[in-house]
Amino acid sequence: KKDGELYWCLEAISPLKNEAGEVTHFVAITEDISARKQTEQTIRHLAFHDVLTGLPNRRLFRDRLNQAVTAGQRNKTGFALMLLDLDYFKAVNDTLGHDAGDALLTIVATRLGERIRSVDTLARMGGDEFALLASDTSRPEDVAALAAALQNALRAPITIQDRELYLSASIGITLYPDDSDDVDSLIKNADIALYRAKDLGRDNYQFFTEDMNSAIVERVNLANSLRRATERGEFILHYQPQVELASGEIGGVEALIRWRHPELGMVSPTQFIPLAEETGIIVSIGEWVLSTACRQARDWELAGVPVRVAVNLSARQFRQGDLAEKIGAILRETDLSPRLIEVELTEGILMEDTEQTSATLDTLHRMGVQISIDDFGTGYSSLSYLKRLPIDILKIDQSFVRDIHTDPDDRSIVTAVIALAHSMHMKVVAEGVETAEQLAFLREQECDTIQGYLFSRPVPPEGILSLLRSRTRLTS
Ligand code: C2E
Ligand code: MG
Ligand code: MG
């Protein structure tokens, strides 16, 4: 331009010829395309950057990661890849709204950006997840220091909508070339390490290790086969008798789930129930347990040996809200008397949501279903819920029973729980009774019922039937 400014132009030049066919002039048409060039530039930027924070996005980050791997192979240099995820960010979005969430993410991007070198790439991978490629940095000490610095950068309170928010972040780290030399696996490794950091209570960083990988692979595989186990009929219920001390007879049984895994054999519920809870699979498993136990109880009732079946319920099932209706439907379907079914709850369930919990329990109680508290004394034992809720039975956890004859504290706890329950018109079941000494003590304290290996292990339904038919009794 006349003022010396450069600009983009598109020019079309045509020659003009005279009659002899010689070129005498040129006609040039010039168009200023600066605006178009600007738009192209913006589009390219948008394709590779995050709109909110202006940081590189996932695509550009992958590209940089590819370059870093190529450079690493050529120069024999290493680098670190970190994935950083804000802890409890969802709570901010949910309670303060998305504008607040966006403002927070922008501040985070700025704070992180201030801590890194210009050769490093900081990117926003989506949501509240950021990624950092730290070039030429592969000594674990240096990488750890950098991770700690990033976490510290986020720690100063952030004021949004007149509120002070305290942030923390979890970080997963993987090193090139030690952990892998392939972009996809590097990202996967960092992700696994991040998951571990979250799992360990958040606000920490974790380096990827091979163990993590195999543990994760194992979990994912287990969760997958767990998902299919119901339809494949791999679950069965075993039943453990509960013996009434006054009569010596079997007053009820507890249904305990077993998983016949096609390759792993019998898998204990202590291994898969927590995984089923986390993944939500427990809801469908729980329904299977309820209807199977009710059908079994009905079979025994029809065979002339009615016995009450106790079923363990998970917190997740309780939270569904329609538990009482579901149990009601199963009872109608199986035509079972409600007094032959008992639900075992944990103290955790009772602490969670008092309104809904008491409504559900009241409905079950009115239907005639027995309600017991499992592993009593190991959770948040609160005496107020014992008063408020319609509870019939307390099950003393086996950890208190185990050392009855060696630990005076355990003896006092067991004695006190039995007295407490009786004064509130509840029955007591002692779990995990294995020895005659334990039995003698429990008898002396007027415990109502015992359950444990001393009398019988959990057994398949046929085992219970023969115990009932033969009228096996507990003798002291
Ligand atoms: P729990 O409800 O407290 O069940 C008692 C556990 O103690 C059972 O373990 C039982 O086999 C074991 N046990 C019984 N008597 C003795 C004894 O004398 N000594 C010892 N050492 N152990 C004894 P199991 O079957 O492995 O079940 C473990 C836990 O898994 C159960 O603890 C329960 O919390 C959960 N669970 C089992 N089945 C189900 C189910 O169908 N649904 C849900 N949500 N959880 C279940
Ligand atoms: Mg139980
Ligand atoms: Mg228990």
Image: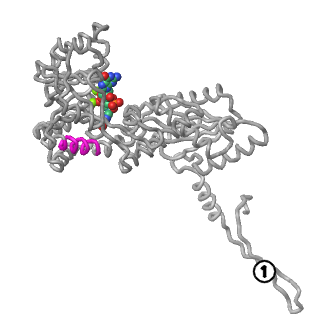
Q: Position of residue 398 (x, y in %)?
A: 30, 20
Residue highlighted by disc 1: 14
Say which quadrant the N terminus sits in: bottom right
Q: Secondary structure at mark 1?
A: strand
Question: Horizontally, is 312 left or right of 366 in the view?
Answer: right
Task: Judge whether residue 66 can be spotted in this image.
Answer: yes
Determine whether 303 is above or below 31 in the image: above
**Which quadrant holds residue 171?**
top right
Q: Give me the residue at 15% from left, 44% from top.
A: 302
Q: Nearer the viewer, residue 436 or 321?
A: 436
Q: Residue furthest front?
A: 470
Q: Main secondary structure of the magenta part?
A: helix
Between 243 and 472, the one nearer to me in the picture: 472
Q: Is residue 91 visible?
A: no
What residue is rendered at 25% in x and 39% in y?
318
Report ligand 2 position as a quadrant. Answer: top left
In the image, residue 175 lies at what x, y percent?
65, 35
User: Is residue 353 rendered magenta in the image?
Assistant: no
Please provide the residue range marked out in magenta: 288-299
Q: Is residue 458 left or right of residue 132?
A: left
Dot 1: few (<14), some (14–19), or many (≥20) neighbours within 10 Å? Answer: few
Q: Nearer the viewer, residue 134 or 241?
A: 241
Residue 450 drawn at (x, y percent): 22, 22
